[in-house]
């Protein structure tokens, strides 16, 4: 059943004028009046709905009984990802949402190739928000992960920690799998470096701010792979897969 995110209050029995982008999608996939869809607004739960009217640039749906279904991990995970080059961040965010991440914090680190001006950062945030919404639609999630504005690593580390910060480092002597087996499910933040990783100084600074250095195993993972592999490990160990 097609699922669509709409940013507005929803209630059973409501007749909703769907946003232009959703109406366009409905036209592209050739849904007709009477077709069943699902709508959610990112605040939890979803509404089965029936299309009542479909035009070239508009569509209306009638909401049915609220379904409290959730697909969240039983523990919150923030991904603090140093900006990679090209479109890798799109892929990282998309897959992290599919795997259950709760929040995404883009970071600027010394070895980042990408440097965002204020104008570019605003455009990127708008684009990444669209990636999050589409990934939530596809993966069956009814809550949208939070997306924070990009920050310099030093500035982000100075903020209060949202759970245990885990610095993924190939130089760490303890693996995340070992640590996870010995720990109960808990809020965590995954700190992932850019291509080339964090510098020694950045890793030291992170640990000075309470980050725990753990490895993702004996193989060195690329920046676009590391967080996703770790998310899967956490979900397998603590529940959510």
Image (cartoon, grey):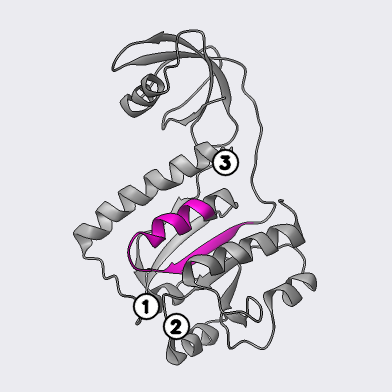
Image quarter of residue 1: top right
Tell me if 102 is positioned left or right of 119 in this view.
right
Magenta region includes residue 112? no
Q: Is residue 172 left or right of residue 122?
A: right
The residue shown at (37%, 78%) is 109
**In terms of depth relative to the viewer, which is nearer, 109 or 57?**
57
| Residue at image point 68% right, 75% down | 176
The residue labelled by disc 1 is 109
- Choose mark 1 or mark 3, whichever is in front: 3
Q: Residues within 10 Å of mark 2 (few under 14, many from 20)?
A: many
Whether residue 118 is situated above or below residue 95 in the rendered picture: below
Mark 3 or 2, nearer chain start: 3
Left or right, 154 with respect to 218, comes to left
* Numbered disc 3: secondary structure: helix
Residue 178 at x, y percent in the picture: 75, 77
Label 1, label 2: how many angstroms apart (C-alpha)?
Answer: 7 Å
Viewer can see residue 161:
no
Q: Which residue is mark 2?
A: 198
Residue lying farthest right?
182
Q: Nearer the viewer, residue 12 or 2?
A: 2
Name the residue nearer the viewer: 77 or 50: 50
Magenta stretch?
76-95
Q: From where the camera sits, is residue 56 visible?
A: yes
Secondary structure beneath label 1: loop
- Which dot marks residue 139? 3
Residue at horizontal 22%, vertical 59%?
Answer: 120
């Amino acid at each position: 059943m097609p699922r669509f995110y709409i940013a507005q209050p929803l209630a059973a029995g409501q007749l909703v004028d769907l946003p232009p982008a959703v109406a366009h999608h409905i036209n592209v996939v050739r849904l007709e009046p009477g077709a069943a869809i699902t709508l959610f607004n990112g605040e939890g739960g979803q509404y089965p709905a029936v299309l009542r009217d479909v035009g070239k640039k508009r569509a209306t749906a009638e909401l049915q009984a609220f379904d409290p279904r959730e697909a969240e991990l039983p523990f919150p995970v923030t991904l603090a990802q140093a900006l990679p080059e090209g479109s890798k961040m799109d892929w990282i965010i998309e897959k992290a949402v599919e795997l259950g991440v709760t929040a995404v914090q883009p970071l600027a680190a010394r070895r980042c190739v990408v440097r965002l001006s204020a104008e570019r950062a605003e455009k990127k945030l708008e684009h990444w928000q669209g990636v999050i919404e589409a990934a939530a639609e596809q993966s069956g999630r009814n809550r949208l992960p939070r997306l924070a504005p990009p920050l310099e690593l030093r500035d982000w580390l100075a903020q209060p920690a949202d759970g245990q910060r885990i610095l993924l480092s190939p130089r760490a002597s303890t693996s995340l799998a070992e640590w996870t087996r010995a720990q109960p499910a808990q809020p965590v933040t995954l700190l992932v470096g850019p291509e080339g990783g964090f510098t020694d100084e950045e890793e030291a600074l992170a640990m000075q701010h309470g980050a725990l250095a753990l490895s993702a195993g004996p193989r060195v993972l690329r920046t676009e792979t590391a967080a996703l592999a770790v998310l899967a490990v956490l979900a397998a160990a603590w529940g959510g897969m």
